[in-house]
Image: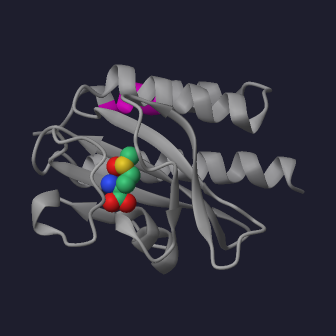
């Protein structure tokens, strides 16, 4: 079923992206908007790649939802580590069936992780958990990928 809210949320994202602000403020606004408006997005957060860590580690950034025990995720762990390593969106319809999954809440049933690129390199990702199984349709995926693109462009401007 098409989610009526998606076009509206996209328009709000465009407005937010056009506003002059720091990337940190923009990322805070993105997680707040998605968490408030997309009712099945129960945890929404960014993990950013720590530039100086070798091997790489993802560090929790702006988020909305309950505090997670996973504030630092090595690239070889979790669904988060997988998405950042391969540089591709990962959608998991049933986290209980995925051996990579690192539990953040016992209520989480499905998850989407979308990498963020700056000049072709993964710099972080947008991670969303849902209490509903298979919560992320093709349209949701497009919306979350759009958010990740906007954040990538924002970061690209300030890191120019
Ligand atoms: N579930 C993620 C860990 C992050 S929490 O969901 C917020 C994973 O498997 O990498």
Q: Position of residue 7 (x, y in %)?
A: 36, 32
Q: Is 82 part of what is drawn in magenta?
A: no
Q: Residue at x 9, y 39 (%)?
A: 1
Front residue (pair 88, 153): 88
Q: Residue at x 41, y 73 (%)?
A: 82
In this picture, which residue range is highlighted in magenta?
A: 6-11
Tell me how many marks there are: 0
Q: Quadrant of the C terminus?
A: bottom right
Q: On the rendered structure, is 24 left or right of 146?
A: right
Residue 36 visible somewhere in the drawing: yes
Q: Position of residue 144 (x, y in %)?
A: 41, 47
Query: Where is ligand 1, by quadrant?
Result: bottom left
Q: On the rendered structure, is 146 left or right of 23?
A: left
Residue 16 figure quarter: top right
Residue 94 visible somewhere in the drawing: no
Q: Residue furthest front?
A: 69
């Amino acid at each position: 079923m098409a989610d009526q809210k998606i076009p509206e949320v996209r328009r709000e994202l465009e407005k937010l992206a056009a506003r002059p602000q720091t990337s940190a403020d923009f990322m805070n606004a993105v997680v707040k908007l998605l968490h408030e408006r997309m009712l099945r997005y129960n945890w929404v957060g960014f993990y950013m790649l720590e530039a100086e860590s070798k091997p790489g580690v993802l560090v929790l950034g702006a988020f909305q939802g309950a505090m997670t025990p996973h504030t630092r995720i090595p690239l070889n762990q979790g669904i988060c580590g997988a998405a950042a390593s391969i540089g591709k969106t990962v959608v998991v319809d049933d986290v209980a069936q995925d051996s990579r999954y690192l539990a953040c809440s016992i209520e989480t049933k499905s998850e989407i992780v979308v990498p963020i690129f700056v000049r072709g390199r993964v710099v972080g990702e947008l991670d969303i958990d849902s209490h509903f199984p298979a919560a992320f349709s093709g349209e949701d995926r497009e919306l979350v990928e759009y958010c990740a693109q906007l954040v990538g462009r924002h970061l690209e401007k300030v890191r120019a």
